[in-house]
Image: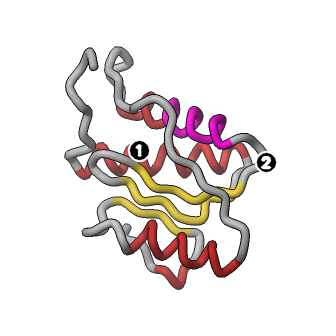
Amino acid sequence: MRQAKYLLSSRESRVLVRDAIVNVCEFRGWVLYALHVRTSHVHGIVDAATSPSRILNDWKAYATRSLGDPGRNHWTHGGSTRRILTPEGLTRAMHYVLYSQGEQLQTYSSDPRLVPSP
């Protein structure tokens, strides 16, 4: 690594990343089901008619622009992706993203019953 690990240690930085990802999903017409921005990574569930790598690249690009400091590496290369095949699987995955990551930091949910943090 050429730079120290970047952490989203402030609430403001996590809000910027959350809002950037919500905005790119709206702009691209992707359905964002759930999102949780942690200090060192992001978990999200999205339905999009494009490749997972395109989604990850767009999320990272929009989030990086929102954070400023263009010379800084904020993200690792690639990311983990999984397909969700059933409605039950979607419900389980949303619950995991929103509630099984430890303390809720900056979250988003398209399901009002899941009541994410503001």
Instruction: Please name whichever residue, 114 or 16, is drawn nearer the observer in this view of the structure.
Output: 114
Residue pointed to by mark 2: 49
Instruction: Answer whether residue 117 is magenta in the image.
Output: no
* Residue farthest bottom in this picture: 113
Is 2 positioned to the left or the right of 78 in the image? left
Percent of width and height locating residue 41 = 36, 47
Circle 2 sits in a helix, a strand or a loop, which is it? Answer: loop
Q: Residue furthest right?
A: 49
Quarter occupied by residue 116: bottom left
> Amino acid under label 1?
Val
Badge 1: how crowded within 10 Å, few (<14), some, or many (20+)?
A: many
Label 1 sits on residue = 17
Q: Where is residue 88 in the image (x, y as percent from the top left)?
A: 65, 81
Q: Residue at x 58, y 76 (%)?
A: 111
Q: Give the image location of residue 23, x and y in percent.
A: 57, 46
Q: What secondary structure prevails in the magenta region? A: helix
Q: In this view, does 11 lie to the left or right of 53?
A: left
Q: What whole-number distance in Å separates the C-alpha atoms at marks 2 and 1?
A: 22 Å
Asked whether residue 61 is drawn in magenta, I would say yes
Q: Which residue is drawn at 41% across and 63% down?
A: 107
Q: What element carries label 1?
A: helix
Closer to us: 106 or 92: 92
- Is 108 situated above or below 78? below
Q: By what rule are the colours in the image chosen? A: secondary structure
- Label 2 with label 1: CB-CB less than 8 Å: no
On screen, residue 10 versus residue 100, left or right, reads left
Residue extent of the magenta highlight: 52-62
Residue shown at 29% from the left, 45% from the top: 40
Task: Tell which of 111 and 98 is nearer to you.
Answer: 98
Q: Which of marks 2 and 1 is nearer the N terminus?
A: 1
Residue type of the residue flagged with mark 2: Ala
**Other residues around mark 2 within 10 Å, as few (<14) / some (14–19) / many (≥20):** few
